[in-house]
Amino acid sequence: MSSAKYAELGAFLRSRRERIHPDEVGLVSGPRRRVSGLRRDEVALLAGASVDYYNELERGAGSQPSEQMLAALARALRLTADERDHLYHLADRPVPRNGGAASHVHPGMLDLLTRLPSTPAQVITDLHVTLVQNPLAVALLGDQSGFQGRDASFLYRWFTDPAARSIYPEDDHDAQSRAFAADLRAASARRDAKDTEASSMIGALLKQSPEFAGVWAEHDVAFRRADRKRIVHPTLGLLDVNCLSLFSEDGRQRLLWFTPALGTDSADLLDLLAVLGPQTLVEPT
């Protein structure tokens, strides 16, 4: 990166930081606040970066930020799609394609996610790649941010990695497989014919998973809009929850949130999630 681009990157980050009020991103402003926008340490917290590292970026110094850090900054600063692309250009990084783990998350989706602090919630793509989770979603489902490539899709891991299935009771596996296949068929048909991401995943699954090939051949099609699920938590045990979905306008992203099923003790168990904290998933080797 040139020194001029470093300086412009720092100025751009500072300008985006100063326009956001803490309440808009789920932070408490406090009575003695000296700045109207976010502080540098707050942006660093939201992006999962060290304060020193973020300070260097705003000063137009330091190392070239990674694509993962740029995605985190774009989400922390609630950038629009054009602003996100500009951020990548300033950092001399290629703008990531839609669908991957670094996909741009619509600011409206992030705003809704922020306003659900007491409910497990996350934003995923139509191919079930997790883009962002709130702390309770990490506590319920595990941290999904460490997966790369096709493994970033939970749907893909469902049919290729037996460990992914531990989240649901074995009795529910067949129903989940059929629901995933039907959802994938609906999502792939909705995509542009020139988009090969979904077709490439389908081709890989047909080769690797006889189970997927079997349910795919049934041609069932149905978006997963609302589900009643039984989730196996490593500490709390079995939780009965409702999984609800809000779709983006183009259908490529979904905000999922989880509520306790009526007539169960899952409400009390979900209340314990914040106390237990996040569960860590083992990354694939």
Image: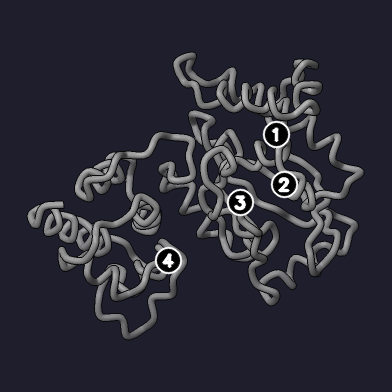
Distance (Cα) linking label 3 and label 1 = 30 Å
Q: Quadrant for residue 254, please give it.
A: top right
Checking the image for residue 224, the label placed there is: 1
Q: Quadrant for residue 136, please give it.
A: bottom right
Q: Viewer-proximal residue, 13 or 111?
A: 13
Query: Which residue is identified by label 4?
Result: 48
Q: Residue furthest bottom?
A: 32
Front tag of 3 and 4: 3
Checking the image for residue 243, the label placed there is: 2
Going by the numbered disc 4, the residue's amino acid type is Gly
**What is the x, y in percent for residue 47?**
40, 63
Q: Is 20 rendered above or below residue 168?
A: below
**What is the x, y in percent for residue 62?**
21, 66
The residue depicted at 15 percent of the width and 57 percent of the height is: 6
| Label 2: few (<14), some (14–19) or many (≥20) C-alpha neighbours in 10 Å | some
Distance (Cα) linking label 2 and label 3 = 30 Å
Distance (Cα) linking label 2 and label 1 = 9 Å
Answer left or right for 177 relative to 195: right
Question: Marks 1 and 3: in contact by CB < 8 Å?
Answer: no
The residue depicted at 59 percent of the width and 17 percent of the height is: 189
The residue depicted at 46 percent of the width and 54 percent of the height is: 111
